[in-house]
Image (tube, rainbow, N blue to C red):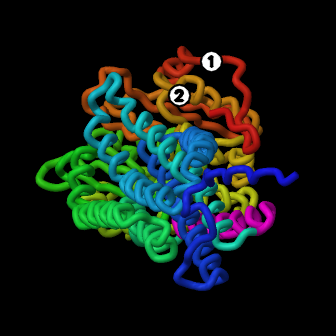
Amino acid sequence: MIEPHAPARPSTQPPWAGPARLPVRPGTGRFLVLAGVFVCAACGLVYELELVALASYLIGDSVTQASVVLSVMVFAMGIGSLAAKRLRWHAAAGFGAVEAALALIGGCSAMALYAVFAWTGNWGGLWAQGPRCLLVAFSLAIGLLIGAEVPLLMELIQRIRRQDAGGAVADLFAADYVGALVGGLAFPFLLLPFLGQLTGTLLTGTVNVVAGGCLVLGLFRRDLTRRGRWLLVLANLTVLGLLASAAVLVDDFERAARHAVYGKDVRVALQTDVQEVVLTGGDHGRPLDLFLDGRLRVSERDERRYHEALVHPAMDGPRARVLVLGGGDGLAARDVLRNRGVRRVDIVELDAAVVQLARHDTALAALNDHVYGDPRVHVTTGDAFDLLRRVHPGTYDVVIADLPDPGITASTKLYSQEFYGLARRALTERGRLVVHAGPVASRRRVFWTVVSTVRAAGLRPVPYRVGGRASGFAAGPDRTAGTSRSPRDWGFVLAARGAAPAEPGLESDERAAERTRVPGLPASTLVHPRY
């Protein structure tokens, strides 16, 4: 008995789900796909690093910003991979659309984040959280699109030449990880120093859309309908046009945003290898302000009060050799040299550009009394921690730590027990250390943690507090210094190797600090920072 033939089942896969019809040999096509993976992975990591860097600069606390960006992005990548499963039968078109969207969103992310910070940061309320909300939104969107790349690329590779899943995954991830390495190195060593964050990110978006468009339209164009090809070409050209327009306008945009942040009297704006340096005022009767990475470091309105409070208590004793850590603006050294008996002042500044400005900018040089022309002043460019490790014991009579706020993550090691231990070793038997420890009223725990840390390093601390019109050392960009009604002050810690230093003029300032005491705080160390 002959059984009738079963009716043929219609294929559930569309025609473009079978072997790819390539204009090149399969080996060449496979290489081109892996090259596309390499380029797209490099671009994706640049977007990620750009968000971390810009958020750390604009919002502050780099550890928190890096954690937010990385955790949200990795979570979104998982969601994006799941969502891309629906596109696997349209892998070529889906990948082209994903790359166009990723190039536009990632390429414009820096400008959008900077714009929200510049024009909404002073509004207060919900608007003040705009940069943080936008940071999370961009991390989520970029993560979704990066996550969608992997399953689509896997489908394209398998359509060129079928192989075991393990081998395909290994090839794909190898290209992906090597691309991430190149992108991770290109951002700090090429894009950031030579192009800056805005132009560098726009260029990355351009490379991204060109790579994705060329891969799909050049290699898998037969998988697309005629309408699909034209739509993808139009989308890519639109993205390229938007990125190119933004690149043309980026200088005007940056200038306008800088004026929105710092005011209209910006005279100098530099992006160095270390930080952004901005000078405002200093001419036509306008007071000079120096900003480093958006944080007000020097204000001519009250810098003399700050530097007198920092320097002069430490100079009441032996003072032949003085070490100034930070203070590349020359203002602390200016007050040091006003004391008799000073034979040598060593300044350790991380950023050579700050020293150059302090030497050659007319207003800043006048403010520091042209201190760098004094033969007793010697400058070393480098990290304060590393320099203290090389200093011979008992070298200095006075060590002045004129450093950024301890709440800034990059400065945390300079407020550690290990750092103060090195400073103690550098002091003579009767030597003194003085530390700028940030505002007391708004950051009591930070201030008293500095005191505990100095004591744990074997020094005898005397904390004191001095009122000022504007603190200027906030953990984030201080853009309300002239309008905030909150109390403004500076906290300092004077310390010595032997008995606690006695300074007759500090009694009232010591009592002012004592009223804010937070007892029982542990010391901050390199492996367990407490700030």
Q: Which residues are magenta?
A: 163-188
Q: Position of residue 216 (x, y in %)?
A: 48, 69
Residue sticking out furthest to the right: 1
User: Residue 337 at x, y = what percent?
Assistant: 44, 56
Three-letter code for the amino acid on which mark 2 is drawn: Tyr
Residue 182 within the magenta-colored segment of the rendering: yes
Magenta stretch prevailing secondary structure: helix
Whether residue 397 is situated above or below residue 160 in the rendered picture: above
Q: Residue at x 59, y 57 (%)?
A: 152
**Of the residues under marks 1 and 2, which one precedes in the sequence?**
2
Task: State the residue in front, 416 or 133.
Answer: 133
Residue 120 appears left or right of 342: left
Image quadrant for the C terminus? top right
Q: Image point 50% across, 35% down: which residue?
A: 438
Looking at the image, is 167 positioned above or below residue 501?
below
Where disc 2 sits, the SS reads strand
Residue of label 2: 464
Secondary element at tag 1: loop
Residue that mark 1 sits on: 518
Please give left or right for residue 232 compared with residue 31 in the image: left
CA neighbours of label 1 inside 10 A, class few (<14), some (14 to 19), many (20+): few
Q: CA distance from mark 1 to mark 2?
A: 14 Å
Q: Residues within 10 Å of mark 2 (few under 14, many from 20)?
A: many
Q: How many marks?
A: 2
**Which of these two is toward me, 442 or 177?**
177
Q: Name the residue at 67% across, 33% down.
A: 530
Report the amino acid beneath label 1: Val
Outermost residue, front side: 1
